[in-house]
Image: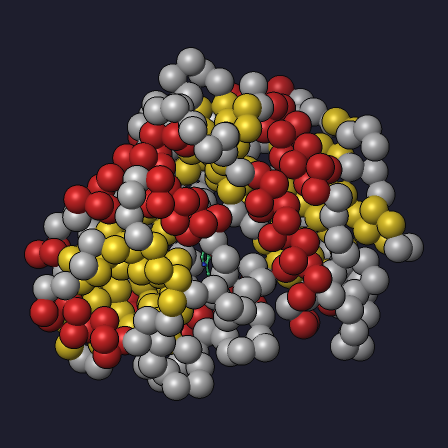
């Protein structure tokens, strides 16, 4: 289906922030993508000026939280070309999230095409300073006006773009994380594997407690035994133990991160043994205390690779690698961002050129 494009008038265009002013998720570009699902089919795909929605207060999304989203980035390369990172992986995951939340499916080619065309329109917004990117937020919300609890019969699928700097203030440097041992994020059979807004809403209370203890992220444990490490609120987690890479197995309760998958692929090519297994929190703290866990880091689109300087568990803080960036963490960061920003050869064919 042809995309309709309605451009913003010159006088309605926004002032673009300078690259050095960029933080995460504060600025939005001049245009957005929008497509509406009604009468069992998607309507015309459209690029329109960025604008607020006028929605009925009875729309399902406001009451029962039927909402899913994705997080992706566009990268400017040294030759000024613009690239996406593994966008079909996001398209696939979006449909898995939609299925879990009883929402409409989207053609994967259209999902990627919508993003590519939107970025072409707003290409001047893709920043170029080191570490800056254009963050892409594809979203679907239930728009049927109805208060009965049932899967909505109508949806909006939209994409907005935000030029961003680092997710964590200070960029690539170790942060403190806290293991939550009372509250849970999700449970077996729940929605943990879907990228659904409700998972994030459920995380906020613990996030707030953690932030009050000077921690930047909560690390969640499994819901049944409160014993196995799962992931953080907005990223997956990896550990270097005896020079091997360990990450919690993704078997339904955690988000199957595309960065996680990519770092595992990268690690294998670089000659590291990778282990996707259950990680017992007691074993982990023993490994840290005995010095066999030498590095820990978060992985995710927004977080890229974020070193973990210390982990607090049951009122005790365990420092990792003297709160310094580890060698392996640094290597993965350099390799991954090197590919994403076109500084090193993309041996995996991950990048998709837009312009
Ligand atoms: N886990 C959660 C809960 C997330 O929100 C994210 C971010 O998208 C990730 C993991 C990492 O996933 P990805 O690498 O696909 O961005
Ligand atoms: C991402 O990394 O894209 C995420 O979705 C994390 C986010 C909730 C900020």
**Horizontal side of residue 68 vs 181, given as left or right:** right
Colouring chosen for the image of the structure = secondary structure
Name the residue rendered at 81%, 58% in the picture: 154
**Above-or-below relation of 50 to 264:** above
Say left or right for 91 vs 332: right
- Compared to residue 205, the image places residue 269 above or below, namely above
**Point 80% across, 77% down: residue:** 148
Extreme residue toward the top, this view: 79
- Residue 39 sits in which quadrant? bottom right
Residue 309 or residue 130, whichever sits in front: 309
**Residue 263 spot, x, y in % from top left:** 38, 46
Q: Residue furthest right?
A: 39
Q: Nearer the viewer, residue 138 or 322?
A: 322
Front-lying residue, 276 or 189: 276
Return the x and y of residue 139 as percentages of the image width and height.
63, 50
Which residue shows up at 67% across the image and 66% down it? 100
**Badge count:** 0
Residue 256 can be seen in this image: yes
Q: Could you say which quadrant of the image residue 102 lies in? A: bottom right
Q: Position of residue 294 (x, y in %)?
A: 16, 57
Q: Quadrant of the C terminus?
A: top right
Q: What residue lies at 11% left-to-right and 70% top-to-bottom?
A: 289
Question: Is the residue 218 above or below the residue 158 in the image?
Answer: below
Q: In the drawing, does residue 116 fall left or right of residue 18?
A: right
Residue 296 visible (yes or no): no
Dividing the image into 4 quarters, which one contains the N terminus?
top right
257 to 32, vertically: above or below: below
Q: Nearer the viewer, residue 182 or 123?
A: 182
Image x and y of residue 305, in percent: 32, 47
């Amino acid at each position: 289906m042809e995309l309709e494009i309605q451009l913003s008038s010159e006088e309605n265009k926004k002032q673009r922030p300078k690259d050095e002013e960029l933080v995460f998720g504060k600025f939005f570009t001049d245009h957005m993508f929008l497509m509406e699902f009604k009468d069992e089919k998607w309507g015309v795909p459209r690029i329109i000026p960025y604008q607020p929605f006028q929605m009925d207060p009875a729309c399902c999304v406001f009451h029962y939280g039927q909402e899913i989203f994705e997080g992706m980035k566009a990268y400017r390369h040294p030759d000024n070309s613009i690239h996406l990172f593994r966008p079909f992986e996001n398209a696939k995951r979006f449909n898995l999230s939609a299925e879990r939340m009883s929402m409409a499916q989207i053609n994967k080619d259209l999902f990627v095409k919508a993003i590519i065309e939107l970025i072409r329109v707003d290409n001047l917004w893709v920043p170029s300073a080191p570490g800056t990117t254009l963050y892409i937020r594809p979203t679907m919300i239930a728009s049927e006006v109805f208060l009965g609890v049932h899967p909505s019969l109508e949806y909006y699928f939209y994409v907005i773009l935000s030029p961003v700097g680092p997710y964590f203030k200070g960029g690539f440097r170790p942060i403190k994380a806290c293991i939550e041992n009372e509250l849970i994020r999700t449970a077996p059979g729940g929605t943990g594997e879907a990228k659904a807004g409700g998972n994030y809403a459920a995380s906020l209370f613990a996030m707030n407690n953690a932030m009050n203890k000077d921690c930047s992220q909560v690390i969640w444990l499994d819901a049944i035994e409160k014993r196995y490490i799962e992931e953080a609120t907005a990223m997956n987690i990896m550990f270097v133990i005896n020079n091997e890479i360990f990450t919690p197995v993704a078997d339904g309760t955690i988000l199957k991160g595309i960065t996680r998958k990519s770092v595992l692929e990268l690690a294998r090519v670089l000659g590291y043994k990778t282990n996707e297994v259950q990680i017992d929190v007691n074993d982990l703290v023993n490994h840290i205390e005995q010095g066999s866990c030498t590095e820990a880091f978060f992985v995710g689109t927004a977080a890229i690779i974020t070193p973990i300087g210390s982990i607090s568990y049951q009122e005790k803080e365990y420092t990792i690698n003297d709160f310094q960036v580890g060698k392996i963490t640094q290597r993965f960061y350099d390799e991954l961002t090197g590919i994403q920003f076109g500084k090193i050869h993309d041996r995996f064919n991950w990048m998709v050129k837009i312009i």
